[in-house]
């Protein structure tokens, strides 16, 4: 067996410039320097969902408390305002927490319309219970469990366009506000 021959320090088989005996490390940012601010899209989604639930519960409560005194125009206006308020609340929260995250902004445009839909449909069984008693909810579930969704769609009063308007207002307000607020953060 032959032993490896000793190479002189001047031996450079790859024709490289002589340098430091160690490889330089890549530059890392200073630990106390300004760090880029990134949003938290998952946190934005969950906080936006929470905001939507809170606004929807308030809308449901107002609707149940005042449905006897509401005209059809008042109920429709309240529904569209609920869409605007739900979208604004969701959009503001998502813009603050999610910042520039496009995924968070899109999630707001999905969450807010769902909050508008469920805010309306959750009021229907409560109104039925207020007018006919709690057992009437069980009867409704046996006969047709989709009565709240049919009432929302306006199948008996030709107000489908209004149902869609509330969803569009909520989605537009949520996405627009999340985009504007997130862009500034």
Image: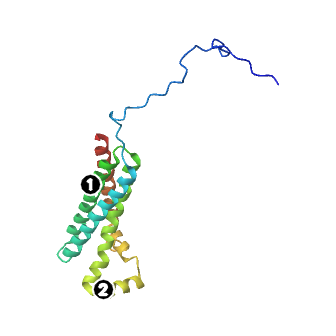
Q: Position of residue 149 (x, y in %)?
A: 37, 72
From what the image shows, is residue 90 above or below residue 63? above
Badge 2 or badge 1: first in the primary sequence: 1
Mark 2 Cα-neighbour bin, 10 Å: few <14, some 14–19, many ≥20: some
Residue occupying the point 65% across, 14% down: 12
The residue singled out by tag 1 in the image is 88
| Distance in Å between CA atoms under marks 2 and 1 | 34 Å
In the displayed orientation, state which residue is furthest to the top: 10
Residue occupying the point 41% across, 81% down: 144
Residue contact between numbered discs 2 and 1, judged by CB atoms under 8 Å: no
Mark 1 Cα-neighbour bin, 10 Å: few <14, some 14–19, many ≥20: many
Displayed quadrant of residue 27: top left
Which sits in the foreground, 172 or 57?
57
Residue occupying the point 26% across, 70% down: 60
**Viewed as shown, does residue 57 lie left or right of 66?**
right
Residue occupying the point 25% across, 82% down: 130
Using the image, tell me which numbered label, if any, was put on residue 134: 2
- Secondary structure beneath disc 1? helix
């Amino acid at each position: 067996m032959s032993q490896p021959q000793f190479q002189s320090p001047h031996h450079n088989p790859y024709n490289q410039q002589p340098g430091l005996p160690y490889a330089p490390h890549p530059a890392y940012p200073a630990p106390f320097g300004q760090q880029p601010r990134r949003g938290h899209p998952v946190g934005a989604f969950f906080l936006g969902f929470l905001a939507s639930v809170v606004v929807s519960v308030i809308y449901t409560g107002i609707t149940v408390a005042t449905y006897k005194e509401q005209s059809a125009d008042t109920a429709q206006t309240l529904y569209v305002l609920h869409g605007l308020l739900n979208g604004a609340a969701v959009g503001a929260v998502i813009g603050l927490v999610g910042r520039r995250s496009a995924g968070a902004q899109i999630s707001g445009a999905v969450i807010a319309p769902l909050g508008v839909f469920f805010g309306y449909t959750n009021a229907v069984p409560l109104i039925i219970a207020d007018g006919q008693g709690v057992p009437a909810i069980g009867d409704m579930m046996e006969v047709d469990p989709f009565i709240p969704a049919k009432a929302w769609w306006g199948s008996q009063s030709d107000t489908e366009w209004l149902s869609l308007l509330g969803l569009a207002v909520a989605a537009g307000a949520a996405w627009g506000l999340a985009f504007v607020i997130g862009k500034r953060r």
